[in-house]
Image: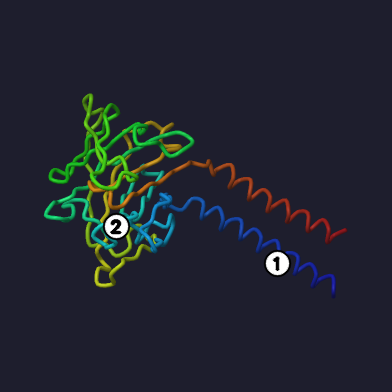
Amino acid sequence: MNVGIAMKRNNARVIVTLGSLLTAVTVVNATPYNITIHDNHSAAGYVGTGVGLEDNDTEPGTIKSDAWDLEAFGYDRSTRQLDVIGTFNFRDGAVANARTLHAGAIFIGTGANLPGPNNWSYAYVLDFTSGTYSLYNAFSIVLPTDIPQSSPWTINPTAGAIATGAFTYLTGLSDPDGFGLTVMTPANASSHNMIQLSLDDLSATVLNDFWVHTTMECGNDNLNGRYQHVPDAGASIGLLGLGLAALVAVRRKIVA
């Protein structure tokens, strides 16, 4: 009788273990990924929230409001789609001191560390009037007008675009990509905006490990992200194999 109870309990433990392993595999494969990283700069006395601590965060010495908040980068490896999310109005910009300050280029870089201002490899320049982009790999950078640590802002091309295409711009979103993004002012709950940009023009090597950056003209907020692909097919099989091996080991122990 006691042996029978022990067998049931041990089998239950293994089943739970297998279930946990399979759940872990599912999480690994979930997309889009929130690839936002903290830029290590925050307005005095204010720390952002969420992955990367960039939701509701602006830079030191800047205006803290939804009008200036860049929130997150999302990336879906299966579709190669990059999502750029913020309560900042990427399409129309924001007004300060009688000036309209516009969104900047979207920079892509490679390497072990976050690229310096002059070391980004690619820049997507977006035309919100036509909904099209131009991709460059030869350019000089243009700095933000006010906050240098948010550099770079946009580019001056030194050669023609290597690719062009279309992108999507969405507004009035409550929680883009399901990242749990919030707002500084509750009345602005549906004020999230999102750029959806295909990175199909970049090589598979670049897309396996890349950095991404954007800011607005004044540099009021600085958004960085990184994606690193970890092959998960072998890991999934390995986890399942470990679970099955554990089950066999428990059964042998019980029989013995």
**Spot occupied by residue 65 in the image (x, y as percentages of width and height):** 27, 63
**Spot occupied by residue 206 in the image (x, y as percentages of width and height):** 41, 33
The residue sitting at the bottom extreme is 1
For the residue carrying disc 1, how many other residues have a C-alpha within 10 Å: few (<14), some (14-19), or many (20+)?
few
Residue 121 vs residue 39, the one in the foreground: 39
Residue 158 sits in which quadrant?
top left
Q: Which kind of residue does numbered mark 2 sit on?
A: Asp
Tags 2 and 1 touching, CB below 8 Å:
no
Residue tagged by mark 2?
69
Give how far apart the Cα atoms at labels 2 and 1 are.
48 Å
Q: Is residue 191 above or below residue 83?
A: below
**Spot occupied by residue 190 in the image (x, y as percentages of width and height):** 25, 66
- Label number found at residue 12: 1
The residue sitting at the right extreme is 256
- Tell me which residue sits at (54%, 44%) in the image: 232
Q: Which callout, 2 or 1, points at the residue further toward the start of the chain? A: 1
The C terminus lies in which quarter of the figure?
A: bottom right
